[in-house]
Amino acid sequence: MECSLAVQSFSQEKLFTSVIKDLVKQGWSVQQNSLPEKLLQDLVDEINYFDNKQLLLPAAIGRRHQKQFDQSIRSDRTLWLDGRSKTQLVLLDFLEAFRLNLNEQLWLGLDEVECHYAIYDKGSFYKRHLDAFNGHETRVVSVVFYLNKDWQEVDGGSLKLYSAKDIQAVSTVLPERGTCVCFMSSEIPHEVLPSFRSRMSIAGWFRRQSTIEKRFGL
Ligand code: OGA
Ligand code: MN
């Protein structure tokens, strides 16, 4: 239980408040020191462990029957978190607290959170995209946590965030350990520039279940 106490004593309320303020104002938020160092290190150890076991696989685009593997759009490797370890449970607890906060403050009616580990090997990227399309998808808020220490601009791999119609990026984020990016999934196009170093992150989505999923208990 040592880990979850560490997360609780961390000023998560402050973080949630700043993120929510930014989401209301501009639809996106970038925060540093978003997770305790111990949890970040445990997540790095775990992603490396799973990578050694070759469990991170080329990522898909689209959901379920629309799944496609198109490496000209994205070339990262991913593994979904399923709560199999204490480290994952600590992060999932944190995200659950975040979900409840978003619902209380913004009335988003979010039902669940899903997230995956991602590794962008040298040369990998994710071209400009939206995480959700209004009316078709159930992803409402996206969140990304970065795990690499000492990331430099020359390492590439920055995340560029755009506002709906802009060609100019509204923010360019270095994927430095502890930085967290959060944005409205259907409003903020974004891209991951080619990375020149192995880039490790966790990407997550707060979702509303579709009516069909609710009706059939999927
Ligand atoms: C994604 C994504 C951004 C990042 O996985 O959909 O856009 O910075 N990730 O890793
Ligand atoms: Mn995305």
Image (tube, rainbow, N blue to C red):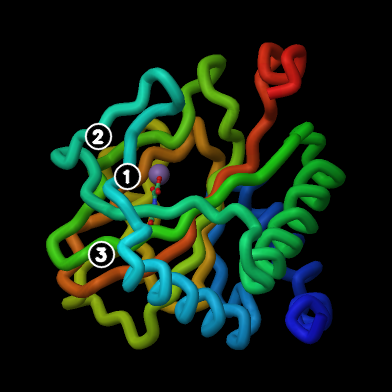
Q: Secondary structure at mark 2?
A: loop
Q: Are marks 1 and 2 in contact (CB under 8 Å)?
A: yes
Lower position in the chain sequence, tag 1 or tag 3:
1
Q: Position of residue 172 (x, y in %)?
A: 34, 61
For ligand 2, give the image quadrant: top left
* Separation of marks 2 and 3 at Cα, in angstroms: 21 Å
Task: Residue under label 3, please give it.
Answer: 157
| Residue found at the very far right of the displayed protein | 104
Q: Residue at x 63, y 68 (%)?
A: 85
Does the Cβ of the disc 1 residue fall within 8 Å of ligand 1? yes
Q: Residue at x 79, y 86 (%)?
A: 2
Tell me which corner region of the image, top left, top right, bottom left or bottom right, holds residue 51: bottom left
Q: In the shown orientation, is residue 189 left or right of residue 94?
A: left
Task: Residue under label 2, please give it.
Answer: 69
Lower position in the chain sequence, tag 2 or tag 3:
2
* Separation of marks 1 and 2 at Cα, in angstroms: 7 Å
Q: Secondary structure at mark 3?
A: loop
Q: Residue at x 47, y 81 (%)?
A: 45
Indicate which label's residue lies in the foreground, 1 or 3.
Answer: 1
Q: In the shown orientation, is residue 22 left or right of residue 193?
A: right
Q: Secondary structure at mark 1?
A: loop
Q: In the shown orientation, is residue 74 left or right of residue 22?
A: left
Q: In the shown orientation, is residue 151 left or right of residue 109?
A: left
- Under mark 1, the amino acid is Ala
Task: Residue under label 1, please give it.
Answer: 59
Does the Cβ of the disc 3 residue fall within 8 Å of ligand 1? yes
